[in-house]
Image: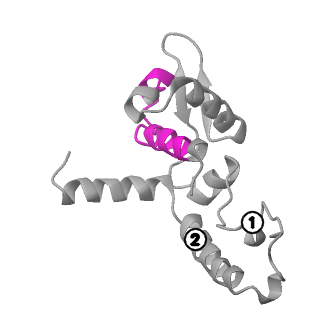
């Protein structure tokens, strides 16, 4: 399951990706209201996204945030990992957040671990090739499919 911080980071980056190239920064209040993200939480997330190198900010009345990487270059796997979340469902198969399972008899003979390892590999494969642009294209397709705009 995605952490709230990760989910909100993805939503904020998608909001910025929709305006990529417009040279118009989005205000925190605009992102917060449109994406239904608590403002204080969003402020902390945006500071982290700036440190990571996904966004830049400008101060002042016309200030706000812009996406500095092309939406095709920002992959879901990187967002998840950089906002502190593991991709694996169990810590014993995590690449970056490994922990042994205390209740496990042995990792080499654990059937559940073997299955979750396959799930992790499939997840990484999908998330590593899915960009912000891909998500926006999916959203547009789904909106059209259901007659929304």
Residue position marked by numbered label 2 in the rendering: 123
Which residue appears farthest toward the left when viewing the image? Answer: 147
Which mark's residue is nearer the viewer, 1 or 2?
1
The residues tagged by marks 1 and 2 sit, at their Cα atoms, a distance apart of 15 Å
Which residue appears farthest toward the front when viewing the image? Answer: 103
Q: Which residues are magenta?
A: 7-30
Q: Secondary structure at mark 2?
A: helix
Give the crowd class for mark 1: few <14, some 14-19, many >=20 residues within 10 Å.
some
Location of residue 55 with respect to 39 vertically, above or below: below
Residue 87: horizontal and vertical position, in percent? 64, 63
| Quarter of the image with the N terminus in it | bottom right
Q: Nearer the viewer, residue 135 or 87?
A: 87
Residue position marked by numbered label 1 in the rendering: 91
Which residue appears farthest toward the top when viewing the image? Answer: 61
Q: In the image, 41: left or right of 110?
A: left
Q: Nearer the viewer, residue 53 or 2?
A: 2
């Amino acid at each position: 399951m995605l952490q709230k911080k990760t989910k909100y980071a993805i939503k904020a980056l998608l909001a910025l990706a929709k305006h990529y190239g417009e040279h118009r920064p989005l205000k925190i209040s605009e992102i917060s209201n449109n994406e239904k993200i608590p403002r204080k939480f969003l402020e902390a997330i945006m500071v982290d996204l700036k440190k990571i190198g996904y966004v830049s900010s400008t101060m002042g009345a016309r200030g706000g945030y812009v996406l500095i990487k092309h939406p095709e270059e920002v992959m879901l796997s990187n967002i998840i990992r950089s906002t502190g979340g593991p991709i694996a469902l169990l810590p014993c198969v995590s690449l970056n957040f490994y922990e042994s399972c205390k209740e496990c008899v042995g990792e080499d003979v654990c059937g559940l671990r073997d299955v979750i390892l396959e799930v992790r590999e499939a997840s990484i494969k999908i998330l590593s090739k899915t960009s912000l642009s891909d998500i926006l294209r999916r959203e547009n397709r789904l909106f059209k499919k259901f007659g929304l705009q």
